[in-house]
Amino acid sequence: MQYKIKGTTMETVDILIETGEKIYTESGGMAWMRGNVSMETNTKGGVMAGLGRMLAGESLFLTTYTCKGKQAVVTFAPEVPGKILDVQLAAGQSLICQKDAFMCAEDSIKLEMHFRKKLGAGLFGGEGFILQKITGPGTVFLEIPGEVREYELQAGEIMKVDPGHIAMFEPTVSYDISRVKGFKNIFFSGEGLFLAQLKGPGKVWLQSLPLANLAAKLYHYMPKSSS
C-alpha cells in the first residue's frame, strides 16, 4: 500500500492499493476513488464490536474497499479543518485516541473502544469515559482538528492540558485530572475547574482546535429562533 497526503488546512489522503489489498473506513468516510474497487459494508467484528465503536464516536457499520484490478486509488477527506496523521503500528502496538479520530486504516488494524477506569477522568476529562483504541499491525490514518504538536514524556514527567486539546497518547501514559487552584483561576481564567494530567513515560499528541471550542464559537453566529 502506498499513499500521499495532500493539502494544507483541509488535507486529503490518496491511498494506492493493488490487487487484493484492502482499506476500511467509517460509514461515509470515502471522498472519491479511481479504478476497479469493490465495497463491502458490515459491522466488522459483529454487532457488539460495532456498538462499542459507536460509543467511541464512530459508525456502527464500516466499509471495506478492495482493489479488484491491478491498481486503484481511494481518497479520504476529514470532516473538519485539521491534519491527517499517518501512523505505522507494529503488531500489538496501540494508541488511545479521542472520539472520532479514526479516519481509515489497513484491514489488519483493529479499532475498538477504550474505557476510562478512573471516575474523575471519565467525568471531568473532557471526552467522557469512552475513547478509541487502535492496535496494529498496519498503517492507520487519523483526522485531528487544527494543528498537531507531539511530545515525548519521560518516566514520571507530568504535563497538564486543557482536556479538549488531547488528540491521542500511548497506553504507557497515565491519564488523570487535577483541580485548578484559586477562586479567580476557577471562575475567570476560562479553563474550568479541572485540567487533564498526563504522566509519562510515552508520547502524547495535542491538537490546537478542540471541536467543542469550534462548536461554541460557531453557535454565537447561528440564527436564533424568535419563538
Image (spheres, grey):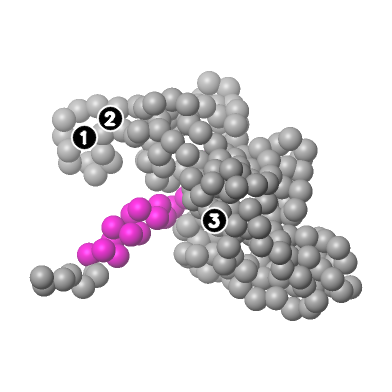
Q: Which residue is mark 3?
A: 59
How far apart, in angstroms, are the residues tagged by discs 2 and 3?
35 Å
Residue range of the region highlighted in magenta in the rendering? 204-220
Residue positioned 40% across, 30% down in the render: 121
Residue position for label 2: 180
Figure check: 10 above or below 59: below
Above or below, 191 relative to 224: above
Q: Position of residue 118 (x, y in %)?
A: 43, 25
Structural crowding at the residue carrying mark 3, measured as other residues with C-alpha within 10 Å and reported as few (<14), some (14–19) or many (≥20): many
Which residue is farthest front? 47
Camera-nearest residue between 42 and 186: 42
Residue indicated by mark 1: 186
Secondary element at tag 3: loop
Q: Is residue 87 visible?
A: no
Distance Cα–Cα, label 1 vs label 2: 6 Å
Identify which amino acid the numbered label 2 is placed on: Val
